[in-house]
Amino acid sequence: VEDIADMDNIINQFLDFVRGTEGEPAQMTDINTLLQALHDRQARAGRELVVQLAPSYAIPVKPLAMQRLLDNLVGNAYTYGRGQVRVASRIDADSIVISVFDNGPGIPESHLQKLLRPFERLDKARSNVGGSGLGLAIADRIAKLHHGKLELLNRPEGGLEARLSLPIKNA
């Protein structure tokens, strides 16, 4: 039964990747509202998520797509990280930056960009954790749909930062 549930999840993620989210209309959305909703979803799932919010700022986003992107990043942080997951937002001169931090082992530098492609996974991840290798590819596609950028960065103190930058110049 667990294998069937895993296959169902993989098929649904593949369909999400193929379909994309181009049809969803953009809405002026306060980023803090999205992050608070993310916190609430994680709390309902019994996960503690530390959220550090920048001042409120609304930009045009596709809310369901952005929810999916954030859920994918936080889900990966819980799956592959160790312990606490933290989400922080900040406003730079021309972008809103949302970072998801974990305390996991990080990712070899040679794989950081590869993991944003469909079906790419680290060998260690394959043996220990189920998944399709589509979560980060979906997140990257959604970031690009919003004219943004998703980066995976190893943290000097250990762990990984998944950094989403969204432009505010057209907001």
Image (cartoon, rainbow, N blue to C red):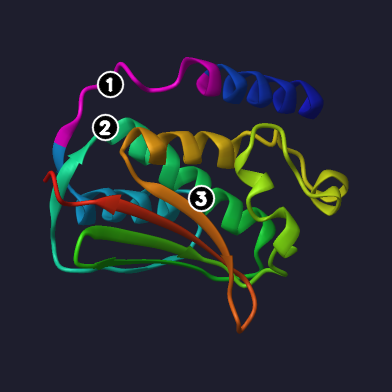
**Which residue lies at the image location 47% right of the left edge and 34% below the top edge?**
141
Disc 1 on helix, strand or loop? loop
User: Is 105 positioned to the left or the right of 101 in the image?
Assistant: right
**Which residue lies at the image location 31% right of the left edge and 38% below the top edge?**
146
Q: Which mark, by number, is residue 73? A: 3
Callout 3 crowding tier (Cα within 10 Å): few <14, some 14–19, many ≥20: many
Callout 1 crowding tier (Cα within 10 Å): few <14, some 14–19, many ≥20: few
User: Is 108 positioned to the left or the right of 85 in the image?
Assistant: right
Mark 1 belongs to which amino acid?
Answer: Glu
- Which region is colored magenta? 16-27
The quarter of the picture where residue 25 lies is: top left
49 falls in the magenta region: no
CA gap, disc 3 to disc 2? 17 Å
Q: Which mark, by number, is residue 24? A: 1
**Which residue lies at the image location 66% right of the left edge and 54% below the top edge?**
79
Q: Position of residue 70 (x, y in %)?
A: 42, 47
Disc 2 on helix, strand or loop? loop
Q: Position of residue 82 (x, y in %)?
A: 66, 69
Q: Which residue is mark 2?
A: 62
Mark 2 belongs to which amino acid?
Answer: Lys
